[in-house]
Image: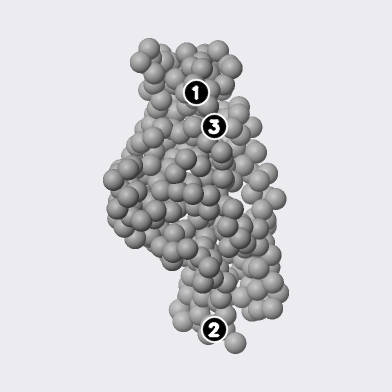
């Protein structure tokens, strides 16, 4: 039997639920796990799961004894990629990259450091079974849906297939999937909203693994405004957790100054980033030496 502790929190031997929690509101660098902004939390006997304001899975980890380190978490991005945050023996990671956690993605180009966590069965278990496990939980505890109707309806809707579809909607409105983010984006835990104001890059460097064959060209402001409107609808209630904007693509800094400034101001105003719960406002761009 579930015992309600307070209006937004529930606890039983099988499950703990917080329908709304507020984490840290300033990005920081510490040697212990930190969660930012506003989110919901469900902890079962198997998994510890966090959800964003749209009730989409945001962070996860297993409570299995096989899980390498209780300080290590997984994070799902708006592009529906899972990132495994490894401690890597804190001191070594900090000395190498200036961060306490090493983000590992399930891409060949991202496997240079930190091992291959996605090859581990306990990690695959979280990625593949978090949603079926919750559906079983909701079935065996129907009273939960009466206590947390909005949260649980949202989780039911946001299946892995739906999240993949939403990621494809993001790629569609941007014109393509982003291939890289600025290195400095790590200072905001890669929590930024992408807006493409240009296409392609200037040099097409032979050694670059993330270039595309498109010639560089700035986009028209009319198309940029359409992107912003679609981004606002796509991010929805979770916009409150974002205070950073990335103007892409690779050589966006080569765009005319007035286009950059107009696009940035329009996006900040339309997305209402001044209402973000996160402190400060940030703008990221890429620029080669020629731009």
Q: In the rendering, at what x and y percent does residue 78 appear?
A: 55, 44
First along the sequence among labels 3 and 1: 3
Q: State which quarter of the image contains the N terminus.
A: bottom right
Q: Residue at x 44, y 28 (%)?
A: 247
Q: Which mark is residue 1?
A: none
Q: Residue at x 43, y 16 (%)?
A: 255
Report which residue position mark 3 lands on: 178
Q: Which mark is residue 208?
A: 1
- Name the one closer to the observer, 153 or 291: 291
Asked if the residue under mark 2 is in contact with the one under mark 1, i.e. CB atoms within 8 Å, the reply is no
Q: In the rendering, at what x and y percent does residue 153 appear?
A: 65, 63
Q: Residue at x 51, y 72 (%)?
A: 65
- Name the one closer to the observer, 67 or 270: 67
Q: Nearer the viewer, mark 3 or mark 1?
A: 1
Q: In the rendering, at what x and y percent does residue 108 appear?
A: 56, 38
Q: In the rendering, at what x and y percent does residue 58 appear?
A: 52, 55
Residue 25 horizontal side relative to residue 199, left or right: left
- Name the one closer to the observer, 111 or 172: 111
């Amino acid at each position: 039997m579930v015992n309600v502790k307070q209006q937004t929190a529930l606890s039983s031997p099988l499950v703990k639920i917080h329908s709304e929690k507020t984490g840290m509101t300033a990005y920081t660098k510490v040697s212990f796990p930190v969660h930012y902004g506003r989110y919901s939390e469900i902890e079962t006997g198997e998994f510890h799961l966090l959800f964003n304001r749209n009730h989409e899975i945001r962070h996860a980890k297993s409570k299995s004894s096989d899980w390498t380190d209780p300080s290590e978490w997984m994070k799902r991005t708006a592009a529906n990629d899972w990132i495994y945050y490894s401690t890597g023996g804190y001191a070594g990671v900090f000395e190498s990259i200036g961060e306490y956690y090493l983000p590992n993605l399930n891409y060949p180009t991202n496997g240079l450091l930190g091992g291959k966590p996605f090859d581990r069965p306990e990690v695959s278990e979280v990625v593949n079974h978090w949603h079926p496990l919750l559906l079983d939980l909701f079935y065996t505890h129907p009273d939960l849906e009466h206590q947390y109707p909005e949260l649980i309806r949202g989780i039911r809707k946001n299946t892995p297939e739906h999240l993949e579809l939403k990621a494809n909607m993001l790629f569609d409105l941007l014109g393509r999937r982003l291939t890289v983010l600025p290195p400095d984006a790590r200072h905001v835990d890669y929590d930024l909203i992408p807006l493409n104001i240009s296409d392609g890059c200037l040099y097409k460097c032979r050694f670059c693994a993330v270039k595309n064959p498109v010639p560089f060209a700035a986009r028209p402001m009319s198309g940029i405004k359409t992107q912003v409107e679609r981004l606002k609808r796509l991010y929805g209630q979770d916009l409150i957790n974002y205070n950073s904007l990335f103007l892409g693509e690779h050589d966006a800094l080569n765009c005319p100054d007035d286009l950059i400034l107009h696009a940035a101001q329009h996006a900040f105003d339309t997305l209402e980033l001044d209402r973000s719960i996160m402190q400060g406002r940030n703008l990221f761009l890429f620029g080669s030496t020629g731009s």
